[in-house]
Amino acid sequence: MDAGQDHGKSKKQSNSFIKQISANPNSQWQKEMEEITKEYDIDREYEASKNTTKTNIEQISIAKFLQTINEEAKTKSKTKHWTEHKTSMELGIRPKHLDRLNRKECSALIRARTRMLQIKENHLKPYPNQGCRLCKSAELETQLHIFQECPEIAERLGKITYKSIFENNDMNTVRNTANHIIKVSEIIENTQDA
């Protein structure tokens, strides 16, 4: 018997084994599938094709994810910030800029989008004085203030629109925005709070 015939035989055995497992309502696999379908509120369509089932599960997963994000946005300020500024959401699709930017640029964009930069509004506890440390104004040091309104940053680096932090379309804009964020972060980290 050659390798091709051997492979065909094991494939038939594998298929019959899978049919046995899926037909047995007491199998561990069936029990786990029941838990998953209940958790995600999925109607199990045994007669549906593989592609139809896959599409249904993807749509249900996306809906569940969006529901979870919207629920969290009600009580979590960083999630709310992200949902308010995100221009589009292509779930399950890796943004192209992640493959074209270096690690430092990607990290800068992600930190800015999730409000994890070392800006006072993002980390309230270590900063009793909430005014801008760069322009010394009494205005709250927010990401919006730093990137669009702070005269000190505008004089040193120029301004970017806050909206550009959340855009993914034009690769040059994304790269320039990431590098602007990096430079702003360096200035902030090297500036003593007043």
Image (spheres, rainbow, N blue to C red):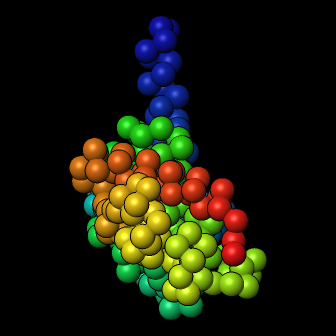
Q: Foreground residue, 51 or 10? A: 51
Label tally: 0
Quadrant into which the C terminus falls: bottom right
Where residue 175 sits, quadrant-wise, is top left
Q: Is residue 127 visible?
A: yes
Q: Picture coordinates of residue 151 (x, y %)?
A: 42, 70
Residue 171 appears left or right of 132: left
Instruction: Judge whether 136 appears above or below 22 on screen.
Output: below
Residue in the image at 50% along x and 18% along y:
6
Q: Picture coordinates of residue 176 (x, y %)?
A: 35, 48
Where residue 33 sits, quadrant-wise, is bottom right
Outermost left residue:
170
Q: Picture coordinates of residue 47 (x, y %)?
A: 32, 64
Instruction: Judge whether 182 appears above or below 89 on screen.
Output: above
Outermost top residue:
2
Q: Picture coordinates of residue 113 (x, y %)?
A: 46, 66
Q: Foreground residue, 182 or 49? A: 182
Residue in the image at 72% along x and 79% along y:
127
Instruction: Judge whether 134 appears above or below 157 on screen.
Output: below
Residue 10 appears left or right of 91: right
Outermost bottom residue:
74
Residue in the image at 51% along x and 77% along y:
142
Residue in the image at 53% along x and 82% along y:
137
Q: Is residue 92 visible?
A: no
Q: Foreground residue, 126 or 24? A: 126
